[in-house]
């Protein structure tokens, strides 16, 4: 497979690849992500193949705006709406009850992780194509890439397209919080602390 690097502004090329069951790497506010359309089970499975990713690891969903949350989540917890108003777009990933129509390759459980990234190129792509299943654009266990060239060095021949939006910030992954219970539970520490989340709920 030939792997192309094109400007991140060329959304139409990415749209063609995605709508034909392909996967695309693109910049986010942390690292480069590798994504497929969220309702394309076969394309999502190809993410696991390209990354040598263990199949038991769920893949988060990125959305372009809060309205898209209803497309992937059922019985959206009130705390998620409040967190979203405060921290999205940004480095907070919320675990929510997933819609049964989401493909099984996303997650083997009844939940799904979701966030809105704070990056203009990611916004443009997600607003154009809708929710995407996205994980870091690297071989599993290898460093997460912060440039298109780093993606190419790891995944050339494995994916068709890389959108080059320059160097990303890299650094700390988003805070991962389980929002399916009565109280938020942080599953992965990140830039947003539990005390900040609780302060939002106490307002």
Image (tube, rainbow, N blue to C red):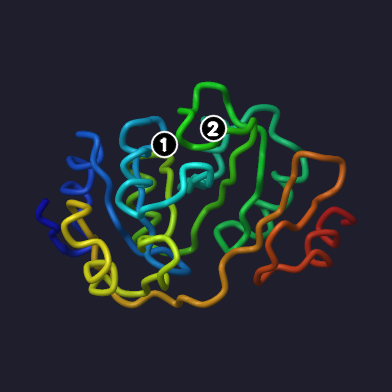
Q: Quadrant of residue 7?
A: bottom left
Q: Quickly name the residue at label 1.
A: 38
Q: Does dot 1 land on a helix, a strand or a loop?
A: loop
135 or 94: nearer the viewer: 135
Q: Quadrant of residue 37?
A: top left
Q: On the rendered structure, is 159 left or right of 57?
A: left
Percent across and percent down for residue 141 are: 45, 65
Percent across and percent down for residue 174 are: 59, 64
Q: Quadrant of residue 91?
A: bottom right
Q: Kindly check if marks 2 and 1 are in contact, taking CB atoms under 8 A apart as contact.
A: yes
Q: How many numbered marks appear? A: 2
In the displayed structure, 145 sits above or below 132; it is: below
Q: Does dot 2 land on a helix, a strand or a loop?
A: helix
Q: Which mark is residue 72?
A: 2
Binning the other alpha carbons within 10 Å of mark 1 as few (below 14), some (14 to 19) or many (20 upward) gives many
**Residue at the image point whose x is 42% and y is 73% from the top:** 143
Binning the other alpha carbons within 10 Å of mark 2 as few (below 14), some (14 to 19) or many (20 upward) gives many
Percent across and percent down for residue 68 are: 51, 37
In the displayed structure, 91 sits above or below 171; it is: above
**Residue at the image point whose x is 38% and y is 30% from the top:** 41
Percent across and percent down for residue 111 are: 64, 36
The disc, 2 or 1, on the residue closer to the chain's N-terminal end is: 1
Furthest-left residue in this view: 2
In the displayed structure, 37 sits above or below 145; it is: above
**Residue at the image point whose x is 48% and y is 48% from the top:** 62
């Amino acid at each position: 497979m030939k792997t192309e690097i094109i400007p991140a502004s060329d959304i139409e090329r990415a749209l063609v690849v995605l709508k034909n069951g392909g996967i695309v790497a693109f910049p986010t506010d942390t690292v480069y992500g590798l994504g497929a359309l969220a309702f394309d089970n076969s394309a999502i499975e190809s993410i696991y193949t390209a990354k040598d990713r263990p199949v038991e690891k769920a893949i988060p969903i990125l959305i372009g705006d809060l309205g898209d949350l209803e497309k992937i989540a059922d019985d959206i917890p009130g705390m998620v709406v409040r967190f979203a108003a405060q921290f999205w777009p940004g480095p907070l990933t919320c675990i929510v009850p997933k819609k049964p129509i989401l493909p099984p390759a996303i997650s083997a459980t009844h939940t799904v992780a979701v966030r809105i990234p704070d990056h203009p190129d990611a916004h443009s792509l997600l607003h154009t194509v809708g929710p995407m299943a996205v994980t870091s654009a690297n071989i599993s266990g290898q460093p997460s890439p912060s440039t298109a060239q780093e993606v190419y060095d790891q995944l050339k021949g494995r994916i068709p397209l890389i959108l080059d939006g320059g160097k990303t910030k890299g650094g700390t992954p988003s805070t991962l919080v389980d929002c399916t219970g009565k109280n938020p539970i942080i599953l992965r520490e990140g830039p947003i602390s539990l005390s900040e989340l609780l302060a939002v709920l106490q307002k």
